[in-house]
């Protein structure tokens, strides 16, 4: 990622979006604290230079790392984060999932129909970015069908008043390829 970032900054490469699926790992951003590591078991931890706190990455989760030159657009970090969230929300809508933002909490959430907690929202997509020389790094993680119990090992993104969900948990069984097709179409409409 650092090498690609450098090439884009020098004008030696076009912008790219990497699509990844990690083996199980907990990654910590610049705001991560060890107090949010609860019971990590055998899952390795890795500190990154992105923003945010602890999250889990693993099989069944699609990670998109846009490496974009914001000097070609607008040098506005908040707008970039807003557009990443919009990208996720629009992608979810392709599969009849209504995503939403939560004030002060980057990422995308879905409202759950839980009679015990009628206003409960669970996170379906995390967001953590780094911007250097106006070139973006890291990005978003969308939960397609990961092992949701892995999120029990941490306080995900430092938030304890909601859970974590996935397409499969919500009853939407789709392939990674189907997600990628929708995400590409929605990305191109925004960026």
Image (spheres, rainbow, N blue to C red):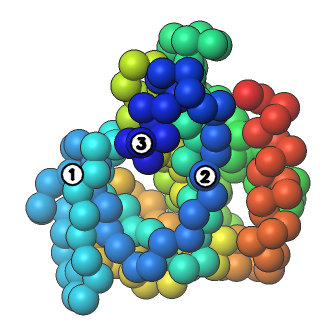
* Residue matched to label 1: 32
Q: Earlier in the sequence, mark 2 or mark 3?
A: 3
Looking at the image, residue 190 sits to the left or right of residue 112; the answer is right
Label ID, residue 18: 2
Judged from this view, the residue extending furthest toward the front is 12
Instruction: Name the mark on residue 15.
Output: none
Tell me if I can see residue 72 in this picture. Answer: yes
Report the residue at 22% width, 88% height from top. Answer: 41
Q: Label 1, label 3: how many angstroms apart (C-alpha)?
A: 25 Å
Q: Earlier in the sequence, mark 1 or mark 3?
A: 3
Can residue 85 be seen by looking at this rendering? Answer: no
Residue at 12% across / 62% down in the picture? Answer: 35
Image quadrant occupied by the C terminus: top right
Foreground disc of the pair 2, 3: 3
Whichever of callouts 1 and 2 sits on the residue coming sooner in the sequence is 2
The quadrant holding residue 12 is: top right
> With 56 as the anchor, is 41 left or right in this view?
left
Reading the image, the residue beneath label 3 is 3
Q: Looking at the rendering, which quadrant does residue 186 occupy?
A: top right
Alpha carbon distance from label 1 to label 2: 24 Å
């Amino acid at each position: 990622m650092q090498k690609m970032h450098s090439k884009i900054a020098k004008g030696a490469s076009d912008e790219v979006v990497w699509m990844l699926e990690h083996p199980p790992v907990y990654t910590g951003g610049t705001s991560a604290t060890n107090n949010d590591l609860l019971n990590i078991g055998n899952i390795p931890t890795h500190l990154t230079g992105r923003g945010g706190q602890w999250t889990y990455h693993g099989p069944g989760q699609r990670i998109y790392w846009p490496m974009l030159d914001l000097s070609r657009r607008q040098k506005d970090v908040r707008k970039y984060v807003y557009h990443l969230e919009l990208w996720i929300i629009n992608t979810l809508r392709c599969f009849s999932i209504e995503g939403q933002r939560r004030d002060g909490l980057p990422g995308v959430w879905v409202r759950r129909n839980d009679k015990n907690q009628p206003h409960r929202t669970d996170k379906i997509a995390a967001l953590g970015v780094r911007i250097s020389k106006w070139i973006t790094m890291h990005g978003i993680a969308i939960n397609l069908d990961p092992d949701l119990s892995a999120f029990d090992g941490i306080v995900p993104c430092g938030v304890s008043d909601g859970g974590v969900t996935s397409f499969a948990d919500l009853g939407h069984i789709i392939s990674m390829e189907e997600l990628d097709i929708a995400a590409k179409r929605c990305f191109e409409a925004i960026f």
